[in-house]
Image (cartoon, helix red, strand yellow):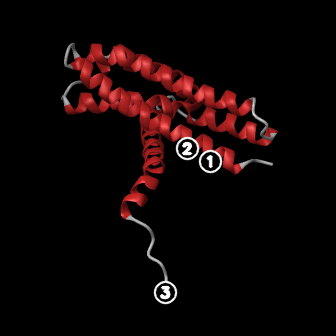
Amino acid sequence: MISLGHLKRRLGQYAALWVGGFLLALAGVWLASAFMDLMAAADLVLPAAMLGGSLGLGGGVIASLVSRETLGTKLAVLLLAALLALPLLWAPVSAAVLIAFVADRSIEYSEAYAAFQIGVARLLFPISEAIGDGELLGWAWTLFQWVSSIVGFFSALANIWPFIRRLLGPEPAEV
């Protein structure tokens, strides 16, 4: 049996990690770029932000594994962590990409961004080779960026939706 309450709690924590990683990297790269080149700022902030997200995700998985939850719940948490790890790592990278876009700079000159892209390509290339032609790597990278951004959007939405509902006030009472 799988505890949906436990999975919901872990997914809420994941959403908070995604949003936090994005916002912290956004603020960090923006502030650091005031004192140094944008690419140097990205190279300084991105590894720390990705490490923080990884440690947060790993901490949640370990907490689930040592909990009294059922084996099915623990396996579901492991599966979700494996599926959502790359989108979580994409959160701070997408923040740096956004800043580079706004600054009209090419993020590809960042060593941290290039290392991340190479790492993802090493993961996606065998998958694209198995599915079909090796030219699918560019398509797979684009798909990865879109899927990760959509996961991040829904993570952010899941995090802020209760706040928005409180701002809108209580539901009208039926007469």
Instruction: Report the amino acid beneath label 1.
Output: Lys
Q: Which mark is residue 175?
A: 3
Does any portion of residue 138 appear in the rendered image? no
Residues marked 2 and 1 touching at CB (< 8 Å) = yes
Q: Measure how far apart labels 2 and 1 are at the Cα level.
A: 6 Å
Query: Residue 32's spot in the image, x, y percent?
Result: 26, 18
What residue is drawn where x is 39% and y is 65%?
169
Q: Residue at x 45, y 41 (%)?
A: 152
Separation of residues labelled 3 and 1 (CA atoms): 34 Å
**Which quadrant of the structure image shows residue 116?**
top left
- Secondary element type, mark 2: helix
Instruction: Give, as a three-letter code, the residue at label 3.
Output: Val
Q: Which residue is mark 1?
A: 8
Where residue 173 sits in the image (x, y, percent)? 47, 78
- SS for callout 3: loop
- Density class for disc 1 (Cα within 10 Å; few <14, some 14-19, many ≥20) is few
- Give the residue at x 58% y 26%: 126
Of badges 3 and 1, nearer the viewer stands: 3
* x, y percent for residue 170: 44, 67
